[in-house]
Amino acid sequence: MAGFSSAFAAGEVNIYSYRQPELIQPLLDAFTKQTGIEANVLFLDRGLVERIKAEGANSPADVILTVDIARLMEAKEGGVVQPVTDNATINKDIPASFRDPDGDWFGLTTRGRVVYASRERVGQNDITYEELADPKWKGKICIRDGQHAYNVALFASMVAHHGAEYTEKWLTGLKNNLARKPDGNDRSQAKSIMAGECDIALGNTYYVGLMMTNDRAPEEKEWAKAIKVLFPNAADRGTHVNISGMALAKNAPNKQNALKLMEFLASGDAQKIYAEQVFEYPVMPGAEPSDIVKSFGQIKPDTLPLIDIAKNRKIASELVDKVGFNEGPSM
């Protein structure tokens, strides 16, 4: 955590992030180049809110970056953020639908939770989430941990649309269609499809772009070539989307620098980086996704309010355990 020892230095800003370092580094590099402010990052895969609480008034955290509406709400409800209500720059660049009404968090990008499908073995180009429980897919679906934030959010959207009873039956059907126990990350699901272990999988849109352009691990380009992107429920309610977002930490020691970073992350320059280098959908009106993302096809986002996903997250998580989802298919 280099640099955090001088948390009160004038030329720094300290970021606590649930976002993977390689996804935010292009943005932070551009911010530092533009402002001269050094951006220090502490990456955590869990326990961010608890850590800031434990640090109390002496916490060096200035800005919180995270994925998933539930984690943004967790930060707000945990009392580790402070509102930003009168920043005309941020409010101009980020639509009201992607801002907390109290100014406690701001959405920066969206991503679709889509189906990766084998180009060789899957002929259809349309699918629904509901269909994933159809026995025709028995032994043909791969997925990461059912309790991962990306999946819980999708399952929470199913609860919001259909109710808990339906979602429990649907999760049971999905579980019974799995090729193996939930495992790996979104990229490894594409690898499993290429290897013939399964025909379809759930994954986020931006990982496809990252795989397609990964010169450091060129084998990922082959994984990406093996799949096509299907946008579930394109003909009806639309594809489940979630957000990445930011918040100002409650006791930010470098508050002015933190606000400069937040303004930058909301700006057109940053939105372009999100689109071209991180392959996410920008939230700024008029900002276009990258040509690679456009090549997947047109996304029709589910208009379900993000707050409805967040409030059903606990029920969805409990259902994952109730049906034994992570135990894999029943033999």
Image (tube, rainbow, N blue to C red):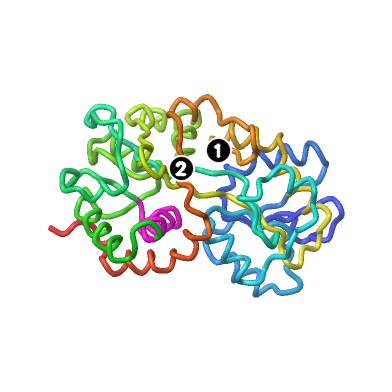
Residue 236: where, in percent of width, then height?
Answer: 37, 42
Camera-nearest residue between 216 and 127? 127
Q: Quadrant of residue 76?
A: bottom right
Q: Quadrant of residue 281?
A: top right
Q: Tell me whether circle 2 and circle 1 mark residues in contact (CB < 8 Å).
A: yes
Locate residue 294 relative to residue 57 in the image: left or right. Answer: left
Camera-nearest residue between 146 and 84? 84
Task: Report how far apart the C-alphas of labels 2 and 1 lie in the structure.
Answer: 9 Å
Residue placed under numbered mark 1 in the picture = 281
In which quadrant of the rendered image does the C terminus lie?
A: bottom left
Q: Dot 2: within a 10 Å radius of its alpha carbon, few (fewer than 14), some, or many (20 or more) residues?
A: many
Locate residue 101 relative to residue 88 in the image: left or right. Answer: left
In which quadrant of the rendered image does the N terminus lie?
A: bottom right
Point out the residue furthest to the right here.
10
Residue at horizontal 33 percent and vertical 52 percent from the top:
183
The secondary structure type at the circle numbered 2 is strand
Residue at horizontal 70 percent and vertical 57 percent from the top:
63
Q: Which labelled disc corresponds to residue 112?
A: 2
The secondary structure type at the circle numbered 1 is strand
Point out the residue furthest to the left here.
331
Magenta-colored span? 144-159
Q: Amino acid at mark 1?
A: Tyr
Residue 141: where, in percent of width, then height?
Answer: 25, 45
Residue at horizontal 83 percent and vertical 61 percent from the top:
8
Locate residue 144 relative to residue 54 in the image: left or right. Answer: left
Closer to the chain start, of discs 2 and 1, is 2
Residue 143: where, in percent of width, then height?
Answer: 32, 49
Residue at horizontal 68 percent and vertical 57 percent from the top:
247
Q: Amino acid at mark 2?
A: Gly
When the figure is inspected, residue 132 is found, relative to residue 48, above or below; the finding is: above
Q: Dot 1: within a 10 Å radius of its alpha carbon, few (fewer than 14), some, or many (20 or more) residues?
A: many
